[in-house]
C-alpha cells in the first residue's frame, strides 16, 4: 500500500509561506492540478540570472528536486532558457505548477 501524499496545492502554499517568511518574494505563476500536479520552482537571483528546480520521484517513489540545467550550462540569458523550457513543459504537462521566487541569495526554499 502506498503512503498518502499531500495535495500539491497545500505543498505549494506552504512553500510560498516559507519563502515569504524568510523575506523573499514568492508567487504562483501557473496553477496546475490541485491534487497531484508536478511543481517547478524558478529562482530569480539578478538580471538574467536564474535557476530552475523541478520535482520528480526517485526509484522508491520519494519526492526529489533536480535541476534540468547543469552548472556548465548556466549563462547570462539563463532566465530566457528557463522560460522556454517551462513553456515546452507546460505544453506537455497541463498539470504543472510553476512557482517563482525572487531572492538575492538564490534560495529556493526546497524541502
Image: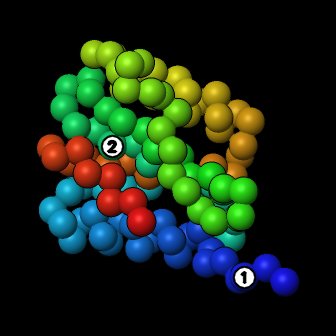
Residue at x-position 41% and y-position 73%: 14
Against 81, is 3 above or below?
below
Labels 1, 2: front one: 1
At x 66%, y 77%, the residue is 5
Foreground residue among 78 and 3: 3
Task: Judge whether residue 58 can be spotted in this image.
Answer: yes
Task: Decide if residue 31 is in sight here.
Answer: no
Could you tell me residue 96's position as x and y percent?
63, 49
Q: Say which of 83 and 55 sits in front.
A: 55
* Residue hosting label 1: 3
Position of the C terminus, as image quadrant, is: bottom left
Residue at (26, 51) in percent of width and height = 107
Q: Is residue 20 above or below residue 24?
A: below
Colour setting: rainbow
Instruction: Pick whichever of labels 1 and 2 is earlier in the sequence.
Output: 1
Residue 42 located left or right of residue 54: left
Mark 2 surroundings within 10 Å by alpha-carbon count, few (fewer than 14), some (14 through 19), many (20 or more): many
Q: Residue at x 18, y 66 (%)?
A: 22
Q: Which mark is residue 43?
A: 2
Task: For mark 1, give the secondary structure.
Answer: loop
Classify mark 2: helix, strand or loop: strand
Amino acid at each position: 500500500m502506498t503512503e498518502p501524499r499531500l495535495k500539491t496545492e497545500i505543498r505549494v502554499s506552504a512553500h510560498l509561506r516559507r519563502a515569504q517568511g524568510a523575506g523573499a518574494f514568492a508567487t504562483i505563476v501557473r496553477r496546475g492540478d490541485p491534487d497531484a500536479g508536478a511543481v517547478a520552482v524558478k529562482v530569480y537571483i539578478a538580471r538574467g540570472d536564474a535557476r530552475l528546480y523541478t520535482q520528480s520521484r526517485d526509484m522508491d517513489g520519494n519526492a526529489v528536486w533536480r535541476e534540468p540545467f547543469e552548472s556548465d550550462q548556466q549563462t547570462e540569458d539563463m532566465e530566457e532558457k528557463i522560460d522556454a523550457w517551462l513553456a515546452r513543459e507546460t505544453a506537455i504537462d497541463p498539470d504543472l505548477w510553476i512557482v517563482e521566487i525572487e531572492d538575492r541569495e538564490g534560495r529556493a526554499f526546497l524541502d
